[in-house]
Structure formats: C-alpha cells, structure tokens
Amino acid sequence: MREACIGLAREAGDAILSVYARDFSVETKDDDSPLTQADLASHRIIVDGLRRLAPDIPVLSEEDADIPWDVRRQWTRHWLVDPLDGTREFVKRNGEFTVNIALVENGRPVLGVVFAPVPDYLLHAEAGVGAFLRERGQDIPLQTRRPASSPLRVAASRSHLDERTARALERMGDTERHGLGSSLKFCRIAEGSIDVYPRFGPTSEWDTAAAQCVLEAAGGAVLRLDGTPLDYNRKENILNPHFIALGDVSLPWRDWLDEGVDG
C-alpha cells in the first residue's frame, strides 16, 4: 500500500501544481483557514484512490471531516489525509506545502507519505521498516541526528514567536532557528538537518500523522508534553494537544517547558 500511496501523492501533487501555475481563487472556511481549487482537486484524487485501494478502510480528510464521533470511535484503522498541508504557503507561492497521507492503526500512524511538489521532495515510511527519501527512483534511508549537539537546530519562526516558544528557546541555550512551513519541519528532523520542533499552538490530526510516522521511523519522536507519543482518533475533537518533535529523544526537553503547564 505504501507504493500506491506514493503514486496517489504524486498524482495529487501534479494537480496542485497545475493550479499553482495559474491564477486561482481563495475561499475562507469556517475556521478562517484558506481553501483553494488545489485543496479540493488533491482531496478528490487521494480519497477516490484510497477507496479503490482499500474499500474497507475509512478515510478522514481535512476537506471531508464531518464524520460523527459515534462513527469514528469504532474505527481501529483509518486513512488520515491532508490534501494540501500549508495552504497559506501555497497562496504565498513559497513552495513550502505538502501532501500528507497516513494510515493509522489503533491510534498510531503506521504508514506515512509526505510529498512537497515544488521541490519534488518525497519522504515515506512504515513502522518497523524505516523512513526513506525517494530520490531519482532510489530510496535513501533516513536517520535523525543523534546525539544532537549544540547549537540545537530548531524549527521556529525567525521573526514571530509566541511567548511560550520564546521561553523554551531561551532555556535550550545555543540554537539556530529555521523557519519552515507545513509538515516539512518534521521531515527535516527525520533527515537530520533540524533537531527540535516545539509546537504550542493549534494543529489538527491530519497535519501531523504522516510526518510523525516518517520521523518515528527515522529514530525520532513526537511527544505530548506529558511524555506520551502523540496519538490519533482518541476523542471527538480532532485538534492535537501541544507537542514537541525530537530527533534525539535523550534531549532534556522537559527542562525547556513552563513548569506545571502540560498543554
């Protein structure tokens, strides 16, 4: 199924780029996030493809998320899809957006594909198998930077930081900040070019699942602030709690957090 998902991600990426190359309209969803023709085209390609691939596995996509909790709570496995992660980056035309496809089993992402169409950057992973960069038809194994040494390379805005992230960065000591959009932050940790991504703002489950699978298969972790792995489809609300993504799980990340606040 991983190769089939890679094919769907590439097909969706082609549809996204066809919109990206021309003028396009931008709508606003109920949560004030942007929506474009590219989001919808990618959604249709991936969801239709997954339903043909595995008719028995339900699909939860950002663009079709109105599935009642009474239905979702019965799922032991499901596809979790963000057809265009980083629509704001897409609208800005900075290339930092991705297609995310994950298979979740019993709350844990076990297969993940992340594809950034503009740089033709594709990562894929399977739990217990490994994480890979697909480049010129070859799969290059990925491994996080372990041990992570100073200066720590942190995925964080160079210019705009929330107060909690700013305090965490101060406690980390010597750091280099790297601003990136979408799930590319996780991907750069997986390949060893970034060490840490603290997230103390809102994200949804489809934003993180595929890239979490990649990062975990490369030796890293995505942890809630209580130290447990980020998991999925455990509650009615599809928003993630605050989390921290690490390439080196031995880093003293608890020392960077505000005392008594678990997010």
Image (tube, rainbow, N blue to C red):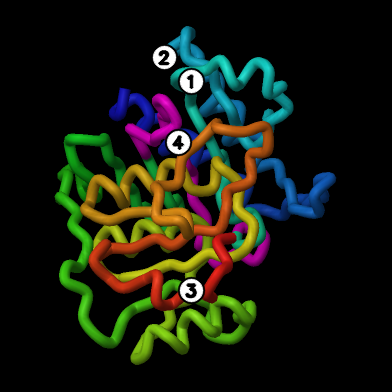
| Residue receiving disc 3 | 257
| Residue receiving disc 2 | 53
Residue 129 image-quadrant placement? top left
Q: Which amino acid lies under the numbered mark 4 shown in the image of this protein?
A: Ile
| Residue receiving disc 1 | 49
The CA span between labels 2 and 1 is 6 Å
Residue displayed at 29% across by 28% down: 3
Q: Which amino acid lies under the numbered mark 3 shown in the image of this protein?
A: Leu
For marks 2 and 3, the one nearer the N-term is: 2
Q: Which amino acid lies under the numbered mark 1 shown in the image of this protein?
A: Gly
Q: In this picture, which residue range is highlighted in magenta?
A: 90-112
Q: Is residue 174 visible?
A: yes
The CA span between labels 2 and 3 is 43 Å
Residue displayed at 25% across by 61% down: 191
Location of residue 195 in the rendering, given as x and y in whole percent from the top left corner: 31, 70
At label 1, counting other C-alpha atoms closer than 10 Å, the crowd grade (few under 14, some 14-19, many 20 or more) is some
| Residue receiving disc 4 | 101
The disc at residue 239 is: none
Q: Which tag is nearer the camera, tag 2 or tag 3?
A: 3
Mark 2 and mark 4 in contact (Cβ < 8 Å)? Answer: no
